[in-house]
Image (cartoon, grey):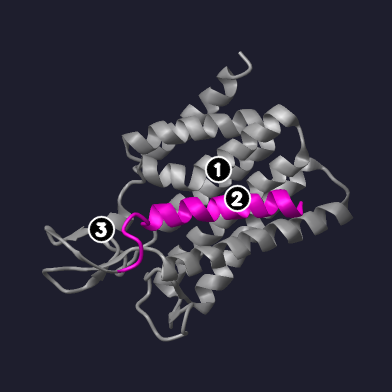
Amino acid sequence: MKFFLPFFLALTVSGAGFFFRALDFSGFTAATLVGAAIFWGAGLPGAAVLVFFFVLGSALSRLPSEILAPEQKARRDWRQVLANGLWPALLALGYGFRHEETYYLAFVCSIAAACADTTSGEIGVRWGGKTLSIINFRTVPPGVSGGVSTKGTLAGLAGSILIAFVGVVPKGWDSSLSFKTILLVSSIGFLGMLFDSLLGAFAQAKYRCAVCRGAVEVPANCGRPAERISGLAFLDNDGVNFLTTLFAGILGLLVL
C-alpha cells in the first residue's frame, strides 16, 4: 500500500503526458517507473520538483520554432526519459532508504541540471539570438550542441533556480539555511548545464547528411545513413543528458 499511492500518482502524471502527446508509449512506461521511484523516495517535495520540471519542459517544447528538426519535436521516448530521470530516481530512492538529506539535495541538483539544460535549449533555439560555440566562441547555428547564447544561458540559470526553489522551500528549513541551499543547488544545476554544453561540443557524435549535406546529430537523415564527422559514435544527445544528470548528482553528494 505504501508504494501503491506513489505509483498511482506517477501513472496519472505520465498518463497526462501521453494524452497530451508529450510522451510516446515507451516514454509513458519509463516515466511511470521513474516517477513512482521519485514519489516514493523523495515524497511530496520530490514529486513537486519532478512535476514542475515535466510541465515546464513540455510547455517549452510546444512553443513554435522554425529551427527545431522534426525528431526534436517528437514525443519523448524511454531513452529521453531515462537520460534525464534515471539518476534522479536512484538518488531519490537513496533518500527513501537512508533518510539522509544529502541524497535528497543531490536529487534536486540532478533535476536542476536537467531543467537548466532544457530551458536554455528551448529558449536559446527560439529567441537566443547570436549563438556561439562554447569552445572557441565562433558563431554557430542555434540548436547546435555546444552552442550557447546569452538569453539561453540566462534561461538555463532561471530554470535551475526555479527547481532549487521548488525543491528546498517545502522542506521548511530556516530562511538562512534555505537561501544558502538554494544558492548551492542552483549553482550546481547551472554548472551541470555548462558541463552538458562542453560535453556536447567535445564528445557528442556529429554527422553530415549524405543527401542535403547539412550538419545533423543523428546517424541517418533524409532517408540515408549520415557520415560521422566528429565525436564518439556511441554518445548522442541522450547520452550527454545522462552524464549531465550523473555529474550534477555526484557534485551534489560531494558538496551538500
Label disc, if present, on residue 70 of the rendered structure: 3
Q: Earlier in the sequence, mark 1 or mark 3?
A: 3
Residue 11, given in percent of the width and then of the height, sits at: 47, 28
Mark 1 and mark 3: span between their CA atoms? Answer: 27 Å
Magenta stretch, overall SS: helix
Most distant residue in the top direction: 1
Part of the protein shown in magenta? 230-256
Mark 1 and mark 2: span between their CA atoms? Answer: 7 Å
Amino acid at circle 2: Ser
Identify the residue position indicated by label 1 in the image. Answer: 87
Q: Earlier in the sequence, mark 2 or mark 3?
A: 3
Amino acid at circle 1: Trp
Q: Is 143 left, or right, of 193 in this rendering?
A: left
Q: Secondary structure at mark 2?
A: helix
Residue 133, given in percent of the width and then of the height, sits at: 44, 79
Identify the residue position indicated by label 2 in the image. Answer: 110
Query: Is 74 in front, or is 87?
Result: 87
Residue 110, given in percent of the width and then of the height, sits at: 60, 50
Amino acid at circle 3: Pro
